[in-house]
């Protein structure tokens, strides 16, 4: 496909608006504690030899995760196993579409990575309350999804699936050859070139889709109130950015939904409801390779009943699965070996960076944070706290009171959560005979702190949580 990238029509205010904030609301309740075998007994300065030894982290997987991706975890440092076969507590969970329940998140869990884009199968707001970062793999499976969207575009334009089914019937009756030319009149279609495509959500998948739609000779419109600069630069020439879903779809022959599913107030549940659907052109084809819950099934059924429109999706729908104008396939958007490898590899690298260095990137609930490399023998501590005033000074004071000099530190916040990474030189404390367990306890039980972690020595040691004022290690 030939692309011309000269100019994009962008409404400036659209670029300025931030991506919708994640809902962090909700009250903290007692989390079920399944296993609390992590111990900090060895985190004392006199146990230096012990806590500089390397142990193993446990990574547990849900769903089938690409072995190429899992190979990113070196065997000498990580035990990786499916959750159902795991023998002990996990430090990190790797999942795809498994609907993660709160009680599957042991008190030992420090991080959760979704090998994919959508995190609506993870109770993210609760994880934020527990101080657990949730990661995803932006863009890793975008090309795979875009290719399936293009497939949906073609399937929605020509009666291909009906034709295949018809040929099977004819074949079974032994009349395929005889009827094939005569019956083709039943399956006429239309061409894509020159038609209008509305792309709702211009992130990794939407931008790729918009670009290829333009390459197919389509007129492309888009809507995304949180359009990133990165995506904006990728959009095809002449793409017209609209200021609402309804204005984007009004003239569209095809609509591609590429937005996240977010429950609750201000979320996207049923965002394609009757009020939107009534603005669709009668023959409009809706491509939903984002999430089934975005579309109100009854409203879509009305559209399909009353027009020659089509609904093509890789999400199940109890109302639409057998509708003559619906093409519903299994959730296959990201099911290519390339996407599975890339997503798992990105998730593994993200988890390793977090576990081994405290670095946060690609998190959907924590701030992007990276402290410069830890000096030899420096100890690194991370602290997760509620984003309220005075926390940085409280944390610094705890170190100062112990006579410990901080070598470097960073503090970042996002929504209701703040994250600190601090390095200090343990040599500075050995003379003082400071029991670092006491320091960690003091840090962790500071009002507003949710958890703390020591990134040094025996993996798993030095992880502590403040659960409703009680200390859990
Ligand atoms: N069918 C499948 O197998 C797959 C489905 N997906 C779905 O596709 C969604 C999008 O994936 P990516 O493009 O990788 O994510 P992304 O985060 O790169 O892009 C999402 C875009 O949607 C925009 N957006 C959010 N709410 C919106 C709204 N109400 N109206 C218009 N735009 C809105 C955001 O500003 C962002 O630019 C995922 O959240 C997931 O639900 C993703 C991968 C595989
Ligand atoms: O990445 C996403 O959001 C997806 O929907 C892909 O899901 P999967 O990893 O194939 O279960």
Image (cartoon, helix red, strand yellow):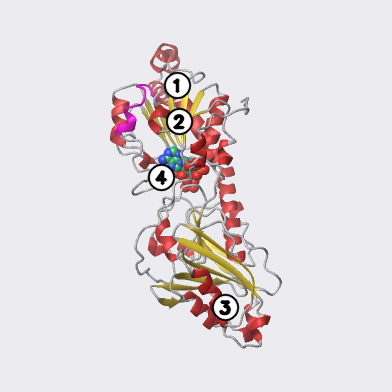
Q: Are dots 3 and 1 in contact, CB under 8 Å?
A: no
First of labels 1, 2 by sequence position: 1
Tag in front: 3 or 1: 3
Instruction: Kindly identify the residue that appears in the image at 44 percent across and 46 percent down.
Output: 20
First of labels 3, 2 by sequence position: 2
Q: Which mark is residue 261?
A: 4
State which region is magenta. 274-284
Q: Are dots 4 and 3 in contact, CB under 8 Å?
A: no
Q: Residues within 10 Å of mark 2 (few under 14, many from 20)?
A: many
Percent position of residue 174, x then y: 41, 20
Kindly report the distance in space between the C-alpha atoms of the residues bearing marks 1 and 4.
Answer: 29 Å
Q: Are dots 1 and 4 in contact, CB under 8 Å?
A: no
Q: Is residue 31 visible?
A: yes
First of labels 4, 3 by sequence position: 4
Q: Are dots 1 and 2 in contact, CB under 8 Å?
A: no
First of labels 3, 1 by sequence position: 1
279 falls in the magenta region:
yes
Mark 3 highlights which residue?
A: 399
First of labels 4, 2 by sequence position: 2
Kindly report the distance in space between the C-alpha atoms of the residues bearing marks 4 and 3.
Answer: 42 Å
Mark 2 highlights which residue?
A: 242
Kindly report the distance in space between the C-alpha atoms of the residues bearing marks 1 and 2.
Answer: 28 Å
Above-or-below relation of 141 to 76: above
Mark 1 highlights which residue?
A: 158
For this view, does 271 lie left or right of residue 93?
Answer: left
Percent position of residue 279, x then y: 34, 27
- Residue that extends furthest to the top in the rendered view of this protein: 182
Q: Are dots 4 and 2 in contact, CB under 8 Å?
A: no
Instruction: Tell whether circle 4 marks a residue whose Cβ is less than 8 angstroms from ligand 1.
Output: yes
Q: Main secondary structure of the magenta part?
A: loop
Kindly report the distance in space between the C-alpha atoms of the residues bearing marks 3 and 2.
Answer: 52 Å
């Amino acid at each position: 496909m030939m692309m011309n990238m000269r100019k994009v029509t962008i409404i400036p205010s659209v670029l300025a608006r931030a991506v919708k904030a994640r809902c962090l609301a909700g009250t903290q309740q007692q989390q079920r504690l399944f296993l609390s075998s992590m111990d900090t007994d060895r985190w004392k300065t006199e146990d230096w030899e012990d806590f500089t030894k390397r142990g193993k982290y446990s990574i547990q997987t849900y769903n089938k995760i690409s072995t190429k991706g899992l190979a990113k975890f070196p065997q000498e440092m990580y035990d990786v196993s499916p959750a159902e076969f795991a023998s002990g507590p996990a430090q990190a969970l790797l999942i795809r579409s498994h609907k993660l329940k709160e009680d599957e998140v042991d008190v030992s869990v420090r991080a959760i990575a979704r090998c994919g884009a959508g995190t609506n199968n993870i109770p993210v707001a609760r994880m934020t309350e527990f101080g657990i970062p949730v990661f995803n793999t932006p863009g890793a499976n975008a090309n795979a999804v875009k290719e399936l969207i293009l497939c949906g575009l073609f399937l929605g334009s020509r009666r291909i699936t009906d034709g295949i089914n018809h040929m099977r019937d004819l074949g079974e009756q032994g009349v395929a050859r005889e009827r094939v030319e005569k019956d083709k009149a039943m399956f006429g279609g239309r061409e894509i070139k020159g038609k209008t495509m509305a792309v709702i959500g211009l992130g990794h998948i939407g931008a790729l889709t918009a670009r290829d739609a333009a390459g197919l000779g389509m007129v492309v419109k888009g809507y995304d109130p949180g359009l990133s600069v990165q995506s904006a630069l990728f959009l095809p020439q002449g793409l017209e950015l609209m200021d609402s879903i309804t204005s984007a779809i009004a003239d569209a022959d095809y609509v591609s939904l590429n937005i996240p599913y977010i429950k609750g107030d201000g979320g996207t549940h049923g965002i394609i409801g009757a009020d939107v659907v009534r603005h669709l052109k009668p023959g409009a084809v809706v491509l939903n390779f984002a999430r089934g819950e975005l579309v109100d099934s009854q409203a879509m059924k009305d559209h399909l009943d009353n027009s020659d429109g089509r609904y093509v999706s890789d999400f199940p729908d109890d109302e639409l699965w057998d509708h003559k104008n619906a093409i519903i396939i299994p959730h296959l958007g990201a099911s290519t070996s390339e996407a599975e490898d890339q997503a798992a590899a990105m998730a593994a690298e993200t988890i390793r960076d977090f576990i081994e260095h405290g670095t946060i990137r690609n998190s959907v609930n924590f701030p992007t944070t990276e402290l410069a490399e830890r000096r030899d023998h420096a100890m690194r501590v991370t602290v997760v706290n509620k984003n309220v005033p005075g926390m940085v000074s409280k944390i610094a004071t705890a170190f100062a009171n112990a006579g410990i000099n901080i070598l470097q530190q960073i503090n970042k916040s996002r929504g209701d959560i703040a994250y600190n990474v601090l390095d200090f030189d343990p040599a500075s404390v050995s003379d003082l005979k400071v029991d670092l367990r006491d320091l960690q306890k003091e840090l962790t039980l500071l009002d507003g702190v949710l958890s703390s972690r020591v990134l040094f020595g025996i993996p798993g040691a030095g992880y502590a949580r403040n659960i409703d004022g009680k200390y859990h290690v």
